[in-house]
Amino acid sequence: MPRHLLLRSITAFSLALAGAAQATETTYRYDTVHSQVLFSIDHNGFSRPFGRLHIAKGVLKLDPANLASASTELDIDLSSLDMGDSAWNAAVLKPGLLDGSKYPLAHFASTGVELKDANHGILHGKLTLHGVTRPVDITFTFNRAGTTIYGLHTVAGFSGNLMLDRTDYGIQAFKNSIGQKVSIWLEIEAIKDANADNPATPSSAKTSTTAQENPSP
């Protein structure tokens, strides 16, 4: 085969492979009921209380057979903060700490995936919290992808964890009683949805698998 024809064939084959790989990437929206953000921070050396936050919205681009190509962007609703006591919630959302009225959302955008094996890796990205954007690394486990028990949805599930220094984000108050390091755990479910990154998608369509398949948890 002449050289120019060989090069043309190789190029066409490469483009076909790239197209096939791209075609297997799917868009998911986060299930805001089954996705939770848990955190723990030292309280004056006596204990490490837990708090919980919810994802407000977000999009995940995922090919379960090629995790390295995954990408995501999401918002965390700070008003969903639950420390187990309404007065405590209000105190943490005051200007000296999270300042929820001025910064109602935390935003995460991925920048890359570093795989350790078929189901484990590190998700690199940037977290914007309290008006400050800094790089973060999330250690994750890909739990599985598959259809729900009633077969109505395709779901992908992940678990993750990371450690933040709150002072890196300008959250400086109560250094003598509240620790600097914040441990964070993520339990994430995302539902396959071709319209997930379409801002015109009705909010009524963005319900959880529980709401659509089973009225009880």
Image (spheres, grey):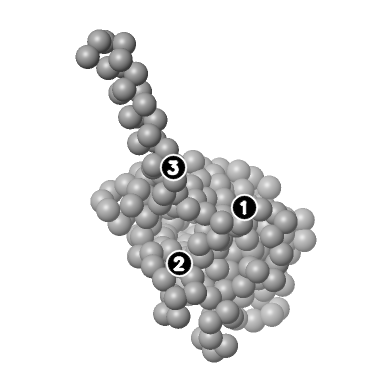
Q: Secondary structure at mark 2?
A: strand
Q: Is residue 65 left or right of residue 186?
A: left
Counting labels gives: 3
Q: Going by the image, does 66 lie left or right of 3? A: right
Q: CA distance from mark 3 to mark 2?
A: 19 Å
Identified at 66% across, 53% down, the residue is 198
Residue 144 % position (x, y): 35, 65
Distance (Cα) linking label 1 and label 2? 16 Å
Which residue is the site of mark 3? 22
Residue 35 in percent (x, y) is at 52, 69
Residue ranking furthest to the left: 1
Q: Identity of the amino acid at label 2?
A: Val
Visible in this render: residue 122? no
Relative side of 50 to 63, left or right: right
Q: Earlier in the sequence, mark 1 or mark 2?
A: 2
Label 1 sits on residue: 197
According to the picture, the residue beneath numbered tag 2 turns out to be 155
Assess whether mark 1 and mark 3 are in contact (beta carbons under 8 angstroms).
no
What's under tag 1, amino acid-wise?
Asp
At mark 3, the secondary structure is: helix
Identity, as a three-letter code, of the amino acid under mark 3? Gln
Q: Secondary structure at mark 1?
A: loop
- Pinpoint residue 179: horizontal percent, then vertical percent: 52, 61
Q: Residues within 10 Å of mark 1 (few under 14, many from 20)?
A: some
Q: Position of residue 142 (x, y in %)?
A: 36, 60
Q: Badges 1 and 2: C-beta atoms under 8 Å apart?
A: no
Seen as rendered, the residue at the extreme bottom is: 216
* Sooner in the amino-acid sequence: mark 3 or mark 1: 3
- Residue shown at 45%/67% (left/top)? 155
